[in-house]
Image: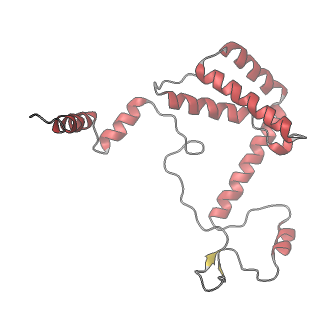
């Protein structure tokens, strides 16, 4: 993976996104919490070494071997994540998520004091009514996965300039503040 930006934060974000898409097991995929924590520590060690440029060839070989051995599990976990995101998007738009056991979940949720989703529930001791359910959520601006977009320096400069900001203004203000604080007696 080639990263053109000189900003180390973009490099780290890109590496972390790549590793997270490959090493995407969850706690319930492990028989014990200790095994899951060991897995997370191993993944973080590899991520750190990739970011710092330590033993890249060995780590890339390990990643390729893991991808080859666990390709089916990786795809299952990606599909599970996509389903969860789709359900969250449907919920944010006020639509019920499509699941296989919709009738069972509706019957188990209904009961004493049940309030339809998106309606206000009664308050406790005269306070404000509390909303229930998920209302429409704002969509993130830009694009990319999870709001992280790796951009090059030139794009960032153009956006800053379009907003009326320039490095010259910052330099001028810094100089004015520095020289304005000098007291000559």
Specify whether 139 is left or right of 92: left
Specify whether 17 is left or right of 156: right
- Residue appearing at x 79%, y 32% in the figure: 39
Q: Nearer the viewer, residue 143 or 44?
A: 44
| Outermost front residue | 185
- Residue appearing at x 85%, y 61% in the figure: 100
- Residue appearing at x 56%, y 22% in the figure: 2
Residue 27, percent from left and from top: 81, 43
Q: Looking at the image, what colour scheme do you see?
A: secondary structure
How many numbered marks are there?
A: 0
Q: Nearer the viewer, residue 179 or 155?
A: 179
Q: Quadrant of the N terminus?
A: top right
Residue 157, percent from left and from top: 35, 34
The part of the image, by quadrant, that contains residue 18 is top right
**Looking at the picture, does residue 86 appear above or below residue 28?**
below
**Looking at the picture, does residue 158 appear above or below residue 88?**
above
| Outermost left residue | 185
Specify whether 122 is left or right of 42: left
The part of the image, by quadrant, that contains residue 95 is bottom right
Q: Quadrant of the C terminus?
A: top left
Residue 155, percent from left and from top: 40, 34
The part of the image, by quadrant, that contains residue 163 is top left
| Outermost right residue | 31
Residue 105, percent from left and from top: 83, 68
């Amino acid at each position: 993976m080639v990263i053109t930006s000189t900003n180390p934060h973009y490099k780290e974000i890109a590496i972390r996104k790549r590793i997270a898409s490959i090493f995407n097991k969850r706690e319930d995929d492990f028989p014990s919490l200790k095994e899951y924590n060991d897995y997370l520590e191993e993944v973080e060690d590899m991520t750190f070494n990739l970011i710092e440029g330590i033993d890249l060839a060995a780590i890339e070989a390990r990643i390729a071997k893991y991808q080859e051995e666990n390709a089916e599990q990786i795809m299952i976990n990606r599909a599970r994540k996509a389903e969860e995101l789709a359900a969250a998007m449907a919920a944010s738009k006020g639509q019920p998520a499509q699941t296989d056991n919709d009738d069972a979940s509706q019957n188990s949720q209904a009961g004493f004091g049940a309030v339809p989703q998106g309606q206000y529930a009664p308050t406790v001791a005269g306070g404000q009514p509390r909303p229930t359910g998920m209302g429409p959520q704002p969509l993130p601006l830009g694009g990319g996965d999870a709001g992280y977009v790796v951009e090059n320096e030139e794009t960032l400069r153009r956006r800053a300039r379009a907003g009326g900001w320039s490095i010259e203004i910052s330099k001028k203000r810094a100089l004015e503040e520095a020289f304005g604080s000098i007291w000559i007696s």
